[in-house]
Image (cartoon, rainbow, N blue to C red):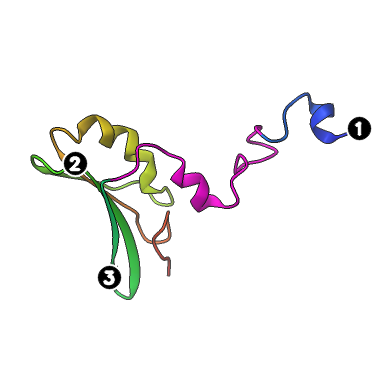
Amino acid sequence: MRRDALLGCDAVSDPILDPLNGAKDERELRERVQPHPDVRGSFVVDGLRLAYEVHGDVGPTAVFLPGVGFPRVYFRPLAALLKDRVRCVLLDTRGAGDSEGP
């Protein structure tokens, strides 16, 4: 008997059995978070490439820094609500999301 049948869950959609939920890697999983940015890019600090994205282009600029180890995409739903009033810049810290780590 298959493991998912024994546990009474769907192996494809269960986050314990498939933490990537069908994605081939963590990057693909992060890109599923909506909405997608207006601008995306990176810059280099101390030899490490750091990734960012921008939502909106009006008003003052608000910079969103996630906690250590968390990618910037967690702020996308909030940026979608604010982008008509504030230019939202979402950054990945070193070693998180699409940024390089030491």
Q: Which residues are magenta?
A: 13-37
Q: Amino acid at mark 3?
A: Val
- Which residue occupies 9% across, 42% down? 60
Report the mark closest to the observer, 2 or 3: 2
Q: Amino acid at mark 1?
A: Met
Magenta segment, prevailing SS (helix, strand or loop)? loop
Q: Amino acid at mark 2?
A: Gly
Q: Residue furthest right?
A: 1
Q: Are marks 2 and 3 in contact (CB under 8 Å)?
A: no
Most foreground residue, 102 or 83: 83
Identify residue for label 3. 45
Quadrant, the N terminus: top right
* Label 2 CA crowd tier, 10 Å (few <14, some 14–19, many 20+): some
Position above or below: 26 against 49: above
Q: How many numbered badges does the structure rendering display?
A: 3
Quadrant, the C terminus: bottom left
- Which residue occupies 59% across, 46% down? 23
Q: Tell me, for residue 62, which label it has, or none.
A: none
Q: Is residue 96 left or right of residue 81?
A: right
Identify residue for label 2. 56
Q: CA distance from mark 1 to mark 2?
A: 52 Å
- Residue 16, given in percent of the width and then of the height, sits at 66, 36
Most foreground residue, 14 or 37: 37
Most foreground residue, 67 or 87: 87
Q: Is residue 70 left or right of residue 43?
A: right
Report the mark closest to the observer, 3 or 1: 1
